[in-house]
Image: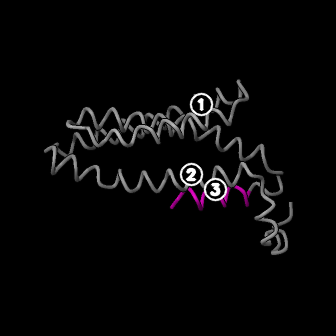
């Protein structure tokens, strides 16, 4: 396969990317911005407001990230089996979005753990189907550009 030329990634090329790629990119960007705004402050909230020890903060993050990693395997399998990539991605993004506001009422580290867990369940559910949706939507020749655009939006 030939390397992309400047002609193959012209402004008209970006406009020609399928709607799914743009929607997923914008959704990923907004979800990432909201996560970064909230979860970067979480260790400070846990330690300074709730008085939680650092080892418990580590357990919360470890449980959350392990949950996301393990669910990616299951959701990828389920996405392939059902062929319902879009709805699994919507479910995952929805769960992450709905869970974050509940941090306002979290008065204990266990509450924070439950909310963080549900947010990462959403991430685990959405990641593999989202990536498969992008791959299914664009031609093999343009997958690199589509994934590059998505990753740029996902790493806000």
Residue under pointer 3: 150
Residue 109 position, x and y percent, is: 23, 37
Residue under pointer 2: 28
As helix, strand or loop, the secondary structure at mark 2 comes to helix
Q: Quadrant of the N terminus?
A: bottom right
Q: Is residue 127 above or below residue 22?
A: above
User: Looking at the image, which residue sits at the far bottom?
Assistant: 6
Task: Report the predominant secondary structure element of the magenta stretch.
Answer: helix
Residue 37, by quadrant, is bottom left
Q: Is residue 154 magenta?
A: yes
Please tell me how crowded label 3 is: few (under 14), some (14-19), or many (20+) other residues with Cα within 10 Å.
many
Q: Which residues are magenta?
A: 144-156
Horizontal relation, residue 147 to residue 10: left or right: left
**Of the pair 154 and 100, the residue shown nearer to us:** 100
Residue 114 position, x and y percent, is: 33, 32
Residue at figure coordinates x 29%, y 49% from the top left: 42
Q: Is residue 70 magenta?
A: no
Residue 15 position, x and y percent, is: 77, 64
Please tell me how crowded label 2 is: few (under 14), some (14-19), or many (20+) other residues with Cα within 10 Å.
many
């Amino acid at each position: 396969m030939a390397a992309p030329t400047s002609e193959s990634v012209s402004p008209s090329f970006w406009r020609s990317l399928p709607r799914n790629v743009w929607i997923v990119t914008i959704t990923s960007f907004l979800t990432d911005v909201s996560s970064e705004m909230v979860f970067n402050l979480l260790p400070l909230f846990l330690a300074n407001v709730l008085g939680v020890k650092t080892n418990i903060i580590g357990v919360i993050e470890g449980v959350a990230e392990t949950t996301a990693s393990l669910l990616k395997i299951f959701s990828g399998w389920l996405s392939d089996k059902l062929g319902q990539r879009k709805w699994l991605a919507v479910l995952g993004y929805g769960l992450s979005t709905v869970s974050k506001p509940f941090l306002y009422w979290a008065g204990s580290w266990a509450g924070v753990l439950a909310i963080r867990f549900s947010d990462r369940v959403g991430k685990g559910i959405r990641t593999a189907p989202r990536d498969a949706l992008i791959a299914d939507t664009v031609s093999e020749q343009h997958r690199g550009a589509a994934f590059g655009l998505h990753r740029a939006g996902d790493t806000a």
